[in-house]
Amino acid sequence: MSESDVQNNGTKRCKLDETRVDSDVTVKTQPSDTSLDAFEFVRVLNQRSQTKWIAIEAKSGDQKAVVLLEKMAFNESNARQILEDNSSASSLRLDFQNDIYSNYMAFPRSDLNAIKTTIIHPASDRHIQKYLHQEIRVVLETPRLYAEVTYPHIQRQQLSLQWVHNILDHKSETERIVCDIEDPDIGFVLLPDMKWDGIQIETLYLVAICRTQGVRSLRDLNETHLPLLNHIKTTSCDAIERKYGVTRDQLRIYIHYQPSYYHFHIHFTSLAFEDPGTVERIHLLDAVINNITLCNDYYQKSSLLFPLKQNDPLFKAFTDKSLEN
């Protein structure tokens, strides 16, 4: 479908916030009306020391919650304040000194030591299992196993998609939308992923959620979806460059399989961003488009490899199926 076809079909053009976001700009956000004082610590579910991230199970009354805490990355603005602003001068505690080398613990003022916080509340047992540290196993899913194991599991087990519909219906997160195309066939909403703070360009992470219904994952894609895939790629790249100054050749564009939720979406991240634990799930969008161009039903015929946590119900379903054979 050409650009003129898109316009003639009445598709809304991409709505862009013209404000550029640079890595040394402090962006003000709306304060949350949720206090962490309302939550009681239960246990640590998982933690990654390299990325300064921790997942905590908590509770509020008789309701469970998942609280994700992540230390914010430095930018030029807060680094300058830590060193030069007398009102924010950090206190230092010496650990050791040897000739010209010294190690300290620094304690900057609280607004320069922010923690990105994500709260899932109330959380189901499946949310808790999602963030719980578990051993990882790799599964090779044949087309037959998809039909007999994975597809029935998707029908039974998937988490609620209400939050996705809230975004598509403009009921939630409207102020975060970077691009919105309302065409029912090739339309999508592009917005920052919850993992991204919206400030550090080096960790840029956006997701495009398609408006087409019935496409759950990579397995559902065929040649009829090529206009959708190409349109999302081209329009999103243009929007990202216009808003954030990140060009197409600086982006990693991919699809996860298995996805974390079963409504089709595409990831856009900076090449400088290292998302731990996803390499086995990544299918680069250009490769996906090429595969479908070469073979219409490529993803219905292919065997696909992906990781699963050992306690994941889908892994148990695969294990039970192997015991039957």
Image: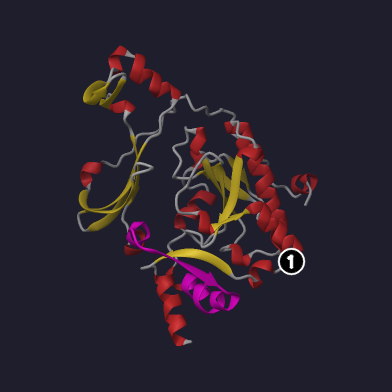
Q: Please state if 154 lies on the left or on the right of 296 as rendered.
A: left
Q: Whole-percent x and y of residue 38? A: 22, 46
Q: Whole-percent x and y of residue 77? A: 42, 22
Residue nearest the viewer, comparing 35 with 226: 226
Report the residue that reaches farthest toward the bottom. Answer: 325
| Residue type pointed to by label 1 | Cys
Q: Is residue 71 visible?
A: yes
Residue nearest the viewer, comparing 280 with 94: 94
Q: Quadrant of residue 94?
A: top left
Q: Please state if 91 lies on the left or on the right of 12 as rendered.
A: left
Query: Circle 1 sits on which residue?
Result: 295
Report the residue that reaches farthest toward the front. Answer: 99
Neighbour class for label 1 at 10 Å: few (<14), some, many (≥20)? few
Residue 141 magenta: yes
Q: Which residues are magenta?
A: 128-155
Q: Is residue 79 above or below residue 141?
A: above
Query: Is the image coloured rainbow, by chain, by secondary structure, or in one colour?
Result: secondary structure
Residue 103 magenta: no
Which secondary structure dominates the residues rendered in magenta? helix
Q: Whole-percent x and y of residue 196? A: 46, 41
